[in-house]
Amino acid sequence: MFLYLYNLISRFGTLVIDYFFAVGAAWLFILNVLYKAVTPPYRFSLIIQQLYVIGAQSVAVVALVGVFTGAVLAVQGEYTLAQFGATAYTGSAIALSLIRELGPVLTALMVNGRAGSAMTAELGIMKITEQVDALRSMAVDPIRYLMVPRIIAGLISVPLLTAIFNVVGIAGGYIVGVENLGLSSGTFMSQMIQAVKDVDIISGFVKSVVFGFTFSWVACYKGWTCGFGAVGVNRATTSAVVTSAVAILVLDYFLTSILTNIFM
Amino acid sequence: MIKIRDLHKRFGEQVVLAGANLDIEDGSVIAIVGPSGTGKSVLLKIITGLMLADFGEVIVGDESMTGAKNSEERRRICRQMGVLFQNAALFDSLTLFENVCFPLDVRKELKETEIKKRSMHYLREVGLRGFENALPGEVSIGMRKRVGIARALVTEPRLILFDEPNTGLDPEVGQEIYELISETHKKFGFTGIVISHEIPEVFQVCSRVAMLYGGQIQAEGTIDEFLASNNQVVKQFVAGNIQGPIQLC
């Protein structure tokens, strides 16, 4: 009995230590990246290259998801608001939902699924095939060369993609609301313009910056600490996507609470 | 001269290097041989500064790699070296030509036209003219190793390390790689360290041989001296016997 309890406590203690060790390592990693991001030499060409990979190549999928999200919001919004005789507010409901909440969250989740997983897999493969060692042997700092451009590109890309998502989503909602459901075009637009305030846009922007930073941090860290072989890359990629997605949703709640308190 | 002095390295309970000592003359090629899992690649990583030793010293020329105060100093010493990794470790997203240009590009010491000219020269030296625009994934492992050699040569380093240069190659292509190492050494005169477990094949590229086992250099000398060694570990390794002091992993 005593031995059983001892083993149980010992195992629990190991888990707690491992957890804090992992969290500490992730923080040390990002502090190292941030220090190297603000000190020379700067590699702008690599940042532009990653902006293309993470940002430009994600435009199509983000726009596609955006247009259908807006369309669904129009149908659901019109159905719900009709029960209160308030279909005139469909435009404002769509715009506020997208700008404050769905735009940043869904964009970050889509970019995480498309570019985050690819980042982790690429970095993991580079690590297990000694490409990271090759960089070091050529006197190139892999943190500066691989991590800094990806994290900065993630930070810039997600807010820009969120803006595209919002615009396309509102357009999708407008088309379905006005053309299919017969809402008044003028009412749709005027209600939307009246309802959306600067603070809503700032709130969405802050969220998208935080989400962009979070997903690229997790993706880079998981690739950097990837285990050996195909199994290691597989685990790291799965873990990166799941961790980022959970982190984005958890952060969304806290950010919403904080930003609402600040701006209301 | 490269000097390895009393090098120690352990991973947890496993002792990999336990006081390894070795001197390598400038301009010579030495093969460091030994059974798989005896720490040859760890030794290579410590020499190149990719791994830190627990104790001991590696001196490259007149600078101490293990005594480097920070990563910046280590990187400066690294610039005197070129490395051919086991699987060439080419960058997948770059073409073969861009891979060869890479070490010069990041140094920013030469003009772009000079970088391209020199990279093309070394790509031709390893017999890969016409494959400049291919990606590493589109060519054979033998060709990738050739590009790896060109990439190691392009900065014209004083020391080149070859980690198991014919791993994953069929005997014919492996022979070609050894011949390429010999030819380039004769032409460019670098100091070479070849890590291998393949004897006698590796003897064709080196003038001296050292055997690493039990964390220490068991024997070192010319090929003839090595083959005539009375060390029981060396004798067993050379004869390829299963019975003897070498404990197989």
Image: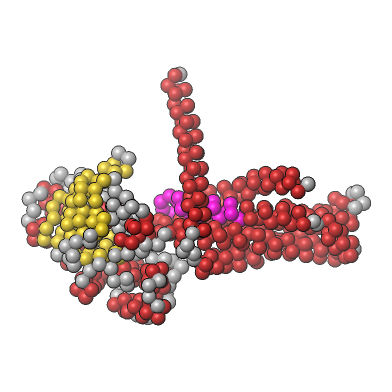
Asked if A3 appears above or below A255 in the picture, the reply is above
Asked if A14 appears above or below B86 in the picture, the reply is above
Asked if B111 appears above or below A15 in the picture, the reply is below
Q: Residue at x 32, y 50 (%)?
A: B52
Residue B226: quarter of image: bottom left
Q: Is residue B148 left or right of residue A207?
A: left
Is residue A249 covered in magenta? no
Residue A66: quarter of image: bottom right
Furthest residue toward right? A85
**Mostly what secondary structure, the magenta segment?**
helix
Residue B157 drawn at (x, y percent): 28, 68
Q: Residue at x 22, y 61 (%)?
A: B61
Asked if A28 appears above or below A134 in the picture, the reply is above
Toward the viewer: B162 or B134?
A: B162
Residue A84 drawn at (x, y percent): 91, 49
Q: Residue at x 47, y 26 (%)?
A: A9
Residue B213 drawn at (x, y percent): 20, 48
Residue B218 drawn at (x, y percent): 15, 50
Q: Is residue A5 left or right of residue B88?
A: right
For the magenta stretch, what is the residue range? Answer: A211-232
Snapshot colouring: secondary structure
Q: Quadrant of the N terminus of chain B?
A: bottom left
Residue B206: quarter of image: bottom left
Whether residue A181 can be seen here: no
Is residue A215 covered in magenta? yes
Q: Residue at x 44, y 19 (%)?
A: A2
Q: Quadrant of the C terminus of chain B?
A: top left
Q: Is residue A209 left or right of residue B41?
A: right
